[in-house]
Amino acid sequence: MHEPTFEAASEYSQVIEHHVTVDSEKHDSLASENLSLGLSHADGVDREYELKCGLINRCLQEEIGFGRYQAQLFVLTGFGWLADDMWFQALAVALPQIQQELNPSRVEYSVLAEYAGLIIGATLWGVLADIIGRKLSFNITLFIAGVFGLSAGASPNFLVFSSMVACMGFGVGGNLPVDGALYLEHIPGSHQWTLTLLSLWWAAGQLVASLVAWIFIANFSCDPSIPDGECTKAQNMGWRYTFYTLGALTLVFFICRFLLFDVQESSKFLVAQGRDEEAIQVLEHIARRNGKSITLRVEDLQAISRNAASGTNPSPKMPLTIVGAFSNLSLDQHCSYYPYLGASLLTLGAVSGSSDLAETYRNYSIISVLGIPGSLMACAVVDWTKKSRHGSVAGGRKLSLAVSTVLTGAFLFLFTTSKTTAAVLGWSCASGLTQNAMYGVLYAYTPEAFPSPHRGTGDALCAALNRIGGLIAPLVKMATTPATGNISGNRATRSVFVSATLLVVAGLMALVLPIETAGQMAL
């Protein structure tokens, strides 16, 4: 047994107190010292929480490390990210067959239903994560998505199908904001780059959906020449088999999370709630799973509370509210970036350049595979920074995000020049590569920019804004095309130009974001 280290913790707290109250003029010279202490001061949290979080960060970094528990959590969190993109892709690739069989007035209504569920789900589950904790949201979202995804495959008509898709979106919508927050709060600062690596699972989700669709939709669908409404269910089971398969896979992910892994609540959420004893129990459990032990004790955390109560460390405690999440203007500015990325869904991702179903889904799969090296590229550069002689820092998350976003826009511009199937496939692969790098950085940077007490709410609102931006795609399609018929070549080109332009603008905006999280341990 390790003896309590109250004296060491108290001394450490005093060092942190010294640094967080230092003159702003000395901020740059102390940045490296703050980094070594696990300190990253942010408005929107009180001093008591910040000091406790410093102790937890030091415990995670120096005593617990990145071990068995974090590796397993990486996989289980990845299941959520995989499911998120898997269902995006599943609906996209199934729309032509759904139109042909169920014959709705506008098949785009199902996309609107999905996004309505995603917006509500992201907001609700993210806000709940800051109120009742991350654990419940982490476990239940995949269950909801799996049940309703399966049910969508058995839909007798388009109204039922759209309703099931909306409920599926409600479940899967909480995965990105909640899973990213929980994972970030369980890893040491030296391994925060693995949050970017989670985008591998995002690429895998697209690949899984593409492969399943290639197997089923390409082989069990009506001939494209059959008019809408005349294609029978028996002739067109491919999209249903796809939904059954992906729904069952999502439920397997839920079982792995709920029954096979003892996921722990976030220790940072617990101390923000004043539940210091439970926070220490969580850290001790994770340390045991990693074959380690910790010296941090509940008395160390409570000593900080006593100092705050006695006036040694006064600071008003901020409520865990939506207002609190945006008390820092820079965080609010960060969120304003998201609608531009949502508009990227204006691109004609379904264009393959071929009318043959097997070739179409083969091309989907090839493009999906190219997302994997995109994630690895992002991981290679997100932590690279260079400090100039004037004190400014280049590189890191912001530069990586800017470059990958601008390149995605550039490749979409070049996509419009395609004259052959090979050119369509080539530029789609290029944009898929950089787009996955972009999302890898984006979905790591977002939770890092928020402190834990407001991370779920802030991340959820960002995700909701992103989904709202995504609503542009079906609305534009409905406004520019007739109820029957495909978008014309000129209109398709204009849509891609709009998306590409917005991506380039968004990439340039990333350079002026006021927060750089590279090299900083998350609060």
Image (cartoon, rainbow, N blue to C red):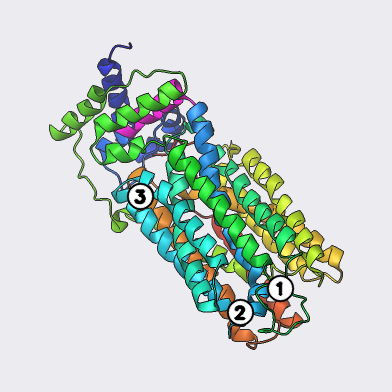
Q: Residue furthest left?
A: 310
Asked if residue 62 is among those painted magenta in the image, a careful observer would answer yes
Front label number (1 vs 2): 1
Q: Which residues are magenta?
A: 52-65
Disc number placed over residue 98 in the picture, else none: none
Nearer-N-terminus badge (3/2): 2
Secondary structure state at the residue bearing disc 1: loop
Observer-nearest residue: 125 or 404? 125
Residue at the location (86% across, 72% down)?
419
Nearer-N-terminus badge (1/2): 2
Q: Is residue 282 above or below residue 393?
A: above
Residue at the location (68% across, 74% down)?
96
Q: Main secondary structure of the magenta part?
A: helix
Q: Is residue 208 above or below residue 114?
A: above
Secondary structure state at the residue bearing disc 3: helix
Q: Quadrant of residue 228?
A: bottom right
**Image marks 3 and 2: residues in contact by CB distance under 8 Å:** no
- Amino acid at circle 2: Leu
Answer whether residue 517 is visible to the viewer in this image.
no
Disc number placed over residue 235 in the picture, else none: 1
Where is residue 408 drawn, in percent x and y?
68, 59
- Amino acid at circle 3: Ala
Observer-nearest residue: 158 or 126? 158
Residue at the location (42% across, 34% down)?
262
Q: Which residue is mark 3?
A: 129
Where is residue 79 drawn, in percent x and y?
55, 46
Could you give the CA–CA distance between mark 1 and mark 2, rounded to whole angstroms? Answer: 12 Å
Q: Which residue is mark 2?
A: 102
